[in-house]
């Protein structure tokens, strides 16, 4: 992972994407332990088994009692962080794409998680991942995809959460996220980046298209979207 440029590093964010926790260790200590029982998901009836065409919503709060608030995402007084918090809470759950790439210039290995990720078709198998970079500093994964056109998308399981989270830090240039996480590199067939052996499903992929966007607030962020076609599955 590369360090940000000096200009980007010295820039002050105009918003807070997450709420700060003043005492992280105390907050974590007061939470209940993780449930390792692996209790199977129970299949139940639908919420309204007797529903018929035209019935609308018959369970829960009446739709007529709900009051909606209209929000303009581009209003002058609305921050990027407000849009971020609304979308990540309103569109959930979202899968995490744990992406392995290699830089095109010096072959530096990169491993990073992205929550703006989804499968978009099965024939051909296609995936989409997007990148939001603050203050003009492109994320390493995004730049690597532009330079090399290939990657491995690894799925994330509960037992990998700590390692995956560790890979998201801004490591110094030349420091491998593979070493930081302790995850195992496994060979691939159609691309150069390694896959994560601990992942239940890994997908070798090649870039089909890349689209760049500008923030509605000039200089605030750059947004990129990458369409990836699967070339191999590892299950």
Image (spheres, rainbow, N blue to C red):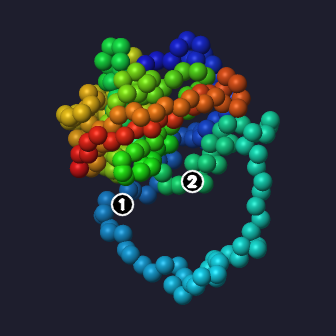
Q: Position of residue 202 (x, y in %)?
A: 29, 43
Q: Position of residue 61 (x, y in %)?
A: 68, 75
Q: Residue furthest top?
A: 6
Residue located 75% across and 39% down the image: 74
Residue located 72% across and 43% down the image: 73
Q: Position of residue 132 (x, y in %)?
A: 55, 32
Residue 91: mark: 2
The image quarter in which residue 40 lies = bottom left
Residue position for label 1: 35
Is 156 rendered above or below residue 49? Answer: above
Residue located 76% across and 73% down the image: 65
The local secondary structure at tag 1 comes to: loop
Quarter of the image where the N terminus is located: top left
Q: Position of residue 200 (x, y in %)?
A: 27, 49
The image quarter in which residue 14 lies = top right
Which one is in front, 199 or 11? 199
Categorize mark 1 by other alpha carbons within 10 Å: few (<14), some (14-19), many (20+): few
Q: Is residue 131 visible?
A: no
Categorize mark 2 by other alpha carbons within 10 Å: few (<14), some (14-19), many (20+): few
Q: Earlier in the sequence, mark 1 or mark 2?
A: 1
The answer to whether residue 97 is left or right of residue 11 is left
Distance from Cα at disc 1 to Cα at disc 2: 25 Å
Tag 1 and tag 2, C-beta contact below 8 Å: no
Which one is in front, 50 or 178? 50
Q: Disc 1 vs disc 2: which is toward the camera? A: 2
Q: Residue furthest right?
A: 76
Residue located 51% across and 35% down the image: 225
Which one is in front, 59 or 3? 59
The answer to whether residue 44 is left or right of residue 67 is left
């Amino acid at each position: 992972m590369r360090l940000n440029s000096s200009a980007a590093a010295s820039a002050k964010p105009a918003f807070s994407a997450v709420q700060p926790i003043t005492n992280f260790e105390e907050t974590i200590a007061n939470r209940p332990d993780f449930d390792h029982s692996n209790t199977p998901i129970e299949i139940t009836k639908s919420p309204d088994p007797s529903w018929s065409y035209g019935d609308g919503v018959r369970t829960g709060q009446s739709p007529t009692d709900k009051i909606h608030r209209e929000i303009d995402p581009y209003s002058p007084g609305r921050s990027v962080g407000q849009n971020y918090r609304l979308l990540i809470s309103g569109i959930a759950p979202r899968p995490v794409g744990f992406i392995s790439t290699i830089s095109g210039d010096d072959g530096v290995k990169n491993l990073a998680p992205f929550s703006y990720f989804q499968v978009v078709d099965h024939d051909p198998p296609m995936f989409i991942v997007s990148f939001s970079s603050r203050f003009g500093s492109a994320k390493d994964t995004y730049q690597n995809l532009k330079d090399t056109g290939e990657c491995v998308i690894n799925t994330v399981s509960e037992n990998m959460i700590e390692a995956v989270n560790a890979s998201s830090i801004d490591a110094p240039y030349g420091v491998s996220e593979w070493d930081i996480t302790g995850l195992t590199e496994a060979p691939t067939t159609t691309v150069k980046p390694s896959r994560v052996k601990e992942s239940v499903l890994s997908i070798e992929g090649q870039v089909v298209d890349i689209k760049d966007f500008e923030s509605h607030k000039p200089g605030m962020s750059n947004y990129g979207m990458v369409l990836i076609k699967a070339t191999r599955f590892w299950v």
